[in-house]
Amino acid sequence: MSGHSKFANIKHKKEKNDAARGKIFTIIGREIAVAVKEGGPDPNNNSRLRDVIAKAKSNNMPNDTIERGIKKAAGDANSVNYEFASYEGYGPNGTAIIVDALTDNKNRTAANVRSAFTKGNGNVGTPGCVSYMFDKKGQIVIAKEECEMDADDLMMMALDAGAEDFSEEEDSYEVLTDPEGFSEVRQKLEEAGIAMASAEVTMIPQTWVQVSEEEAVKNIQKILDLLEDDDDVQAVYHNWEG
């Protein structure tokens, strides 16, 4: 993954989301609702909710909005009927794309996802057709400009907390964990006052695909844009080295 500026990627995502902040807040709001329904409204006893709150804060979601979302989900648990759905498929040039959704209507979401792939000259495949090309990992990205700690000290702290891997990029540090250990590692870094640009369980490609043909690049971008504009879509993972 060297050569990829994870922090620049995250900054780009955030800047993009600032123009459509309602979208990211909708995504996190649904995650809060599902987390509360599964584990209750107290983040001290609900690690999934703790992680969603951390994600909300890293996306500048106001505390009162977070608290309102928790109270609403706790007080009206029966109305929280989002289901998780995952789709896999191919973009142009054999690029692999995974789409995670939280939806109250799987038929609508499936149709929208299929349409996005078709419009970008891609196609939805069967479950498992591309996910084997990715590793599910907890990923924490720390911007160098916001971290005064020495790289070696930060690495030791992360590894002592249970991280699997630590790497240094041009403008950031990356901490990788197994999905089960993510919450504990993130919490220990947070307690140590480490500011995180991003902290989430994600799908990391094992290899990246380069696409140079202009039409193919446009089509991949079209698929990704249509998916990201869909309110049901929570996350999109791909191996396009864009």
Image (spheres, rainbow, N blue to C red):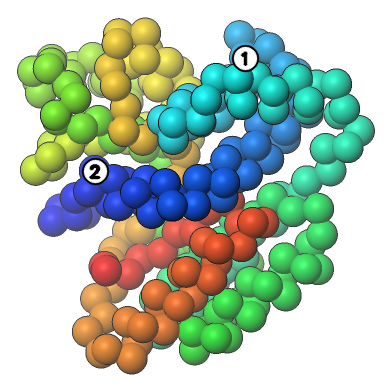
Q: Residue lying farthest front?
A: 19
> Is residue 144 in view from this perspective?
yes
Residue 38, percent across and down? Answer: 76, 28
Q: Name the mark on residue 70.
A: none
Give SS at disc 2.
helix
Residue 26, percent across and down? Answer: 63, 44
Position of 23 with respect to 57 (left or right) is: right
Amino acid identity at mark 1: Pro
- State the residue at coordinates (35%, 66%): 239
- State the residue at coordinates (33%, 16%): 189
Residue 87, percent across and down? Answer: 62, 65
Give SS at disc 1.
helix
Looking at the image, is 17 positioned above or below residue 192? below
Position of 77 with respect to 218 (left or right) is: right
Residue picked out by circle 1:
43
Q: Quadrant of the N terminus?
A: bottom left
* Mark 2 Cα shell of 10 Å, populated few (<14), some (14-19), many (≥20): many
- Asked if the residue at tag 2 contacts the one at tag 1, i.e. Cβ–Cβ closer than 8 Å, the answer is no
Q: Earlier in the sequence, mark 1 or mark 2?
A: 2
Position of 56 with respect to 66 (left or right) is: left
Amino acid identity at mark 2: Phe
Q: Name the mark on residue 7.
A: 2
- State the residue at coordinates (40%, 78%): 220
Residue 223, percent across and down? Answer: 49, 75
